[in-house]
Image (cartoon, rainbow, N blue to C red):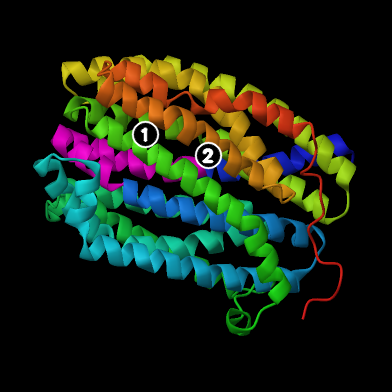
Amino acid sequence: MSEERDFTKKLLTLVFPIAFQQFMLALVSASDALMLGVLSQDDLSAVSLASQVAFVQNLFLAAMTIGLSMLVAQYWGKKDRQAVEQIFAYVLKVSTGISFLFTLAAFCFPEGIMGIFTPDAVLAAKGAVYLRTVSLSYLLTGISQIYLCILKNSGRAALSSIISSTSVVINLFLNALLIYGLFGMPRLEIAGAAIATVIAKTVEVLWCILETLKKDRIKLRWVYMVEGCPRLRHDFWKYTTPVLGNEIVWGVGFTMYSVIMGHLGSDAVAANSIANIVKNLVACFGLGLGSGGGIMVGNELGAGRLDRAKRYGRKLCIFSIVCGIVSGLLLLALNPFILQITNLSAQSQTYLKWMIVMCSYYMIGKSINGTTIAGIFCAGGDSKFGFLCDTITLWCITVPLGFLAAFVWKLPVLAVYFIVNLDEIIKLPAVYHHYIKYQWVRDLTIKEDKK
């Protein structure tokens, strides 16, 4: 098989299933907001703000899965099944512990958490109902995401996508039943959206566990939960810690954007909520390109084919540019349709129209940076760059400017939104300069036997 055909086959079997999975996951958030938006703008805004808790949890899970993929992709390329199972067991244990803390916090202190995001008593009260009800889903998500990550990295990306997508379909169906009380079900509104999420995540976890019991699957071996390879644990944290720092720096900065917009009024919150949902839906292929591309490059690096990994990286960068441009154009094309189907005030509609325009060029930077920083660089363990890049971009430039624009200079809502959406564009020169250093072209696997 020629290298070109090999690349295309891997692109189709990895990137597209992962992109579809990302789209379906984003669709859950979209359905919660849009279905609740039919009831009232306050319901939409409250759930959007409450969902920031899941967003923060996903920062930790993203770090866990990226760190897991870094090592598993290379060891799978090396055909070292024992190392894969040892890493899987250890990361699942860590992810479950972290996710349990999120469940505990959301169940016990929902009012206090909502108070961080908005001073509006109505939004805080509605959001607290959602948080307490949905809290169990955080633990379930922490378990399922590690299982799904292992499936993607062990040649079963399509199965991972099927499991995740089925969970989403269940969630969407139950959303309609429980939010509106269809077919004799109770009308639970915000609480209904939360219950639907918990049920769907339960199905997802059970399905993942059953898959690992089948023949030739990567197994969860309890002995590795207690006794693993110290060197593998060391390597996991060596490469994951910068990623975790990067995710927290970026995620808390992004959450600060929600805090800024949350203090600019209900119209700004509602428009920002819809803009983020649409942006996340359209960005899914770019996310799939980064995740799948990282696995592709990691497999080649672990197998010792460094030159081929380098060529794969170059092709993925070209794809990321094309993907970003197409995503931006799609957003512009969808803008009139989005304005028609949203039940927003006239002021919110005006905000939303121009926010989507700003998101269109943001997509280009998002696609390129996601493919390089989270995909190609991390495939070779080059995870420190993203941490430094986001720390400088967010905390030295866009977050301070956003706070000044909103609370000191009192700029209009759209001017504030423009400022806080510059981060992905600002990064581009530094990302390109770092890419051509090729520090990411490295084999991370242990040469000696693991004990």
Mark 1, residue position: 277
Q: Looking at the image, can residue 337 be seen?
A: no
User: Of the numbered discs in the image, which one, if any, rests on residue 95?
Assistant: none
- 41 in relation to 234, above or below: above
Q: Looking at the image, can residue 331 be seen?
A: yes
Q: Give percent across and percent down for residue 263.
A: 22, 32
Pointer 1: residues within 10 angstroms few (<14), some, or many (20+)? many
- Locate residue 24 relative to residue 258 in the image: left or right: right
Tell me what residue is drawn at x 75 percent, y 49 percent.
380
Residue 401, picture quadrant: top left
Q: Give percent across and percent down for residue 132.
A: 21, 60
Circle nearer the N terminus (1, 2): 1
Mark 2, residue position: 391
Amino acid type at image mark 1: Ile
For this rendering, which residue is in front, 334 or 182?
334
Q: CA distance from mark 1 to mark 2?
A: 25 Å
Q: Which residues are magenta?
A: 22-51
Tell me what residue is drawn at x 53 percent, y 50 percent.
245
Q: Give percent across and percent down for residue 359.
A: 44, 22
Q: Is residue 32 magenta?
A: yes
The residue tagged with tag 1: helix, strand or loop?
helix
- 98 in relation to 424, above or below: below
